[in-house]
């Protein structure tokens, strides 16, 4: 595969994540609950992945390794649960801002778990990102009318679990084919979802063809495609450039909420989104430059 394809795969993965909040909001508007939305998403997502996995190359693993991969997928399920909980009380354009705090939460995790202290440039980047987040959240402006502390709590919690998932997925099963890693992660996530929301809840909920559509969209763009695309692209692109490309999730989520859901997005919120991008780029400039130079040397 040509080297320029890997960044595009990550970019597409980020865009996929960006549209999730819109479909969740539409499902809520149709009368479906968090439990039904989450169950349908992971059920369809698992089907997508296992169909591909069954016809793909595999590496035989001992049961302990399989269980480890399942465990590494648990934060993925928690991220969806917390994020969708936030969407019950926050606009989609606001909830994504809290999820996006994973950019600096990840640096904090590295500091705590790996004793890797953030550099001065990284700290400046975090400060810029936080400032942009305040603007993007619309706090203190008309755009912040939908702000609730409980929604902010769930949204920020989703950023912590997403950071943990990124941290674990970058080290667990790196020798495995991308589809096998993604399938095992997602299976672990689905098992947790089944513990939290037993399938019996479906029996007490009036269903229609709408939930099939929402489940297909959320399963494809939330469970199946992003982990698979990231598993393929991240090892070749690096975490620095990968973070920047993944951040395509942010403008996509805001634009979808504006054009599809009709949510109000002020000029200050758009300015905050731009500042967040600048903060991410400042914090990863050195990493990205080194990766680009390494790729150029490898190609020559």
Image (tube, grey):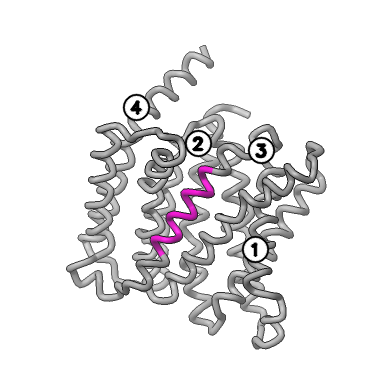
* Distance from the alpha carbon under mark 1 to that under mark 4: 38 Å
Q: Which residues are magenta?
A: 155-167
Q: Quadrant of residue 177?
A: top right
2 or 3: mark nearer the eye: 3
> Is label 4 in a helix, a strand or a loop?
helix
Residue named by callout 1 = 192
Q: In the visual, does 225 lie left or right of 278?
A: right
Does label 1 or label 3 sit earlier along the sequence? 3
* Label 1 Cα neighbours within 10 Å, binned few <14 / some 14-19 / many ≥20: many
* Distance from the alpha carbon under mark 2 to that under mark 1: 31 Å
Q: Looking at the image, which is closer to me, 41 or 101?
A: 101
| Identity of the residue drawn at 49% across and 81% down | 29
Does label 1 or label 4 sit earlier along the sequence? 1
On the image, the x and y values in percent for residue 3 come to: 55, 27
CB under 8 Å between discs 2 and 4: no
In the rendered image, is residue 258 in sight? no
| Identity of the residue drawn at 47% across and 71% down | 85
Please tell me the numbered disc located at residue 21: none
> Is label 2 in a helix, a strand or a loop?
helix
Is 161 inside the magenta-drawn segment? yes
2 or 1: mark nearer the eye: 1
Residue named by callout 2 = 7
Does label 2 or label 1 sit earlier along the sequence? 2
Residue named by callout 3 = 173
> Is label 1 in a helix, a strand or a loop?
helix
* Label 3 Cα neighbours within 10 Å, binned few <14 / some 14-19 / many ≥20: many
* Label 2 Cα neighbours within 10 Å, binned few <14 / some 14-19 / many ≥20: many
Residue named by callout 4 = 286
């Amino acid at each position: 595969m040509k080297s320029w394809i890997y960044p595009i795969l990550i970019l597409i993965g980020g865009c996929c994540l960006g549209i999730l909040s819109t479909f969740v909001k539409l499902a809520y508007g149709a009368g479906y609950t968090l439990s039904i939305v989450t169950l349908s998403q992971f059920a369809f997502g698992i089907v997508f992945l296992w169909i591909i996995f069954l016809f793909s190359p595999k590496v035989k693993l001992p049961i302990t390794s399989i269980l480890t991969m399942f465990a590494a997928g648990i934060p993925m399920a928690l991220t969806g649960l917390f994020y969708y909980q936030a969407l019950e009380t926050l606009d989609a354009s606001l909830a994504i801002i809290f999820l996006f705090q994973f950019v600096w939460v990840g640096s904090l995790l590295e500091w705590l778990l790996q004793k890797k202290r953030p550099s001065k440039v990284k700290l400046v980047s975090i400060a810029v990102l936080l400032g942009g987040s305040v603007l993007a959240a619309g706090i203190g402006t008309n755009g912040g009318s939908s702000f609730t502390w409980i929604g902010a709590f769930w949204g920020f919690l989703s950023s912590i679990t997403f950071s943990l998932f990124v941290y674990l997925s970058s080290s667990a099963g790196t020798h495995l084919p991308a589809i096998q890693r993604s399938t095992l992660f997602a299976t672990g996530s689905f098992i947790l979802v089944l513990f939290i929301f037993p399938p019996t809840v479906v029996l007490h909920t009036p269903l229609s063809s709408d939930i099939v559509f929402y489940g297909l969209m959320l399963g494809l763009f939330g469970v199946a495609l992003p982990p698979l695309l990231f598993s393929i692209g991240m090892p070749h692109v690096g975490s620095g450039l990968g973070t920047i490309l993944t951040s395509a999730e942010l403008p996509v989520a805001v634009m979808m909420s504006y054009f599809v859901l009709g949510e109000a997005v002020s000029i200050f919120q758009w300015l905050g989104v731009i500042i967040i991008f600048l903060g991410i780029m400042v914090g990863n400039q050195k990493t990205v430059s080194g990766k680009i130079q390494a790729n150029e040397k490898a190609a020559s």
